[in-house]
Amino acid sequence: MKTVAETWLDKQKSTAIRYATAATVMALSLLILLQLAGAASADPDRWMRQGWKGTDFSKTSIDFSEVLSGGPPKDGIPSIDQPSFRPASQIETLGEKEPVIRLEVNGELKGYPLQVLTWHEIVNDTIGGMPVAVTYCPLCNAAIVFERRVDGEPTTFGTTGKLRNSDLIMYDRKTESWWQQFTGEAIVGSQVGSALKMVPARVVSFSAFLAEAPDAKVLVPNNPRMRDYGRNPYAGYDSSRRPFLYSGEMPDGIAPMVRVIVVKGDESKKPMAVSMALLRQKGEMMLGDVTVTWTHGVNSALDKSRIADGRDVGSIRTTMKAADGSARDVVHDVTFAFAFHAFHPDVKIMIE
């Protein structure tokens, strides 16, 4: 089996910039080693020469040394800005248990398969009249949807090619500010101090999505031959002992690559997190006033070389009782313990 670094390099060779020569691959491998050793430089002047002239680097909420290059340049992992869809009943490229982000806004329902998002990481779309950015960071297993507005105006988001705590750093095309995908917060640029609004969504199996709404739209590649859609370039990653491109502190009492369910708090509340293993054992738990349930039937997107063959990690739903007694979905994320700890080191993960 290939190492995580090797499979990661395979992905980068398949991006729009293809790393074609052996010399380039060797140079990229050396870059990874330097990053893991904490030796990669963080130089805003150099970044500006690499296409970031529109970013205001005088404003930042982080130390630039925390930013690592993921390999590809700006937009080297291309976002999908003009998404194509087909009715779920006409999809033949998804396995029954393949993970799909289920998103419903103002009565409109759409599905975004992780086999597509793995290779693009951001889909800029409009659903139910709301402009959204549907995002997925494979290294953190973080599938999060945002309302894509900056200063109240719709914009689109792209990939910077950079990581912080092994998590995708996005940028908006209005101000070229950098945004942390895990938190939705602007970390560099004129928007520092702002945060994107998260939109409730959940990962379900394709078969469940199809059974619920066979006519609902499902994202399909604009060019099916552009990538090996359905392949997982991170084979074995979620069974590895350590995360990739991360050298921060590890959580206590729980392995770094264990999945945890994070219920996002509002500005007045801290997020809450529980290990997938504990929730799977109980089936249902209460985190504050949020009901968290686990059901079987969804493949891991980060296990086998083909996503359709991945082991069953289950599906999560988080709901809160509304005033009329109905259950409404609330924002949550299913991520790895190391990522949650990196961004919320003062919050304990429930493991028993």
Image (cartoon, rainbow, N blue to C red):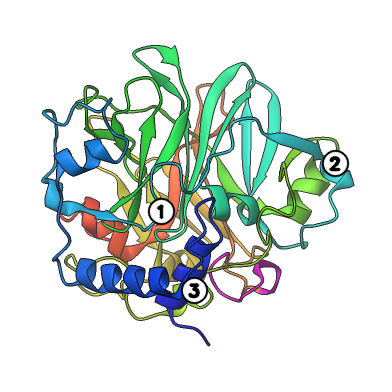
Instruction: Name the element at disc 2.
Output: loop
- Find residue 37 and report its image quarter: bottom left
| Residue at left offset 26%, top offset 56% | 165
Separation of disc 3 and disc 1 at Cα?
15 Å
Q: The residue under label 2 is which amino acid type?
A: Pro
* Number of residues whose C-alpha sits closer than 10 Å to that of mark 3, classed few (under 14), some (14–19) or many (20 or more): some
Q: Which residue is mark 2?
A: 214
Q: Which residue is mark 1?
A: 72
Q: Nearer the viewer, residue 221 or 180?
A: 221
User: Which numbered circle lies on residue 249?
Assistant: none
Instruction: Name the element at disc 3.
Output: helix
Q: Along the polypeptide, which appears first: circle 2 or circle 1? A: 1
Q: Is residue 352 visible?
A: no
**Main secondary structure of the magenta stretch:** loop
Separation of disc 2 and disc 3 at Cα?
34 Å
- Please say if the residues under marks 2 and 3 sit with CB atoms less than 8 Å apart: no
Question: Percent x, y for residue 75?
Answer: 45, 42
Instruction: Name the element at disc 1.
Output: loop
Q: Is residue 145 visible?
A: yes
Q: Nearer the viewer, residue 115 or 209?
A: 115
* Number of residues whose C-alpha sits closer than 10 Å to that of mark 1, classed few (under 14), some (14–19) or many (20 or more): many
Q: The residue under label 1 is which amino acid type?
A: Pro
Q: Which residue is mark 3?
A: 7
Q: Which contiguous range is marked in magenta?
A: 301-309
Q: Along the polypeptide, which appears first: circle 3 or circle 1? A: 3
Question: Percent x, y for residue 138?
Answer: 47, 58
| Residue at left offset 70%, top offset 25% | 108
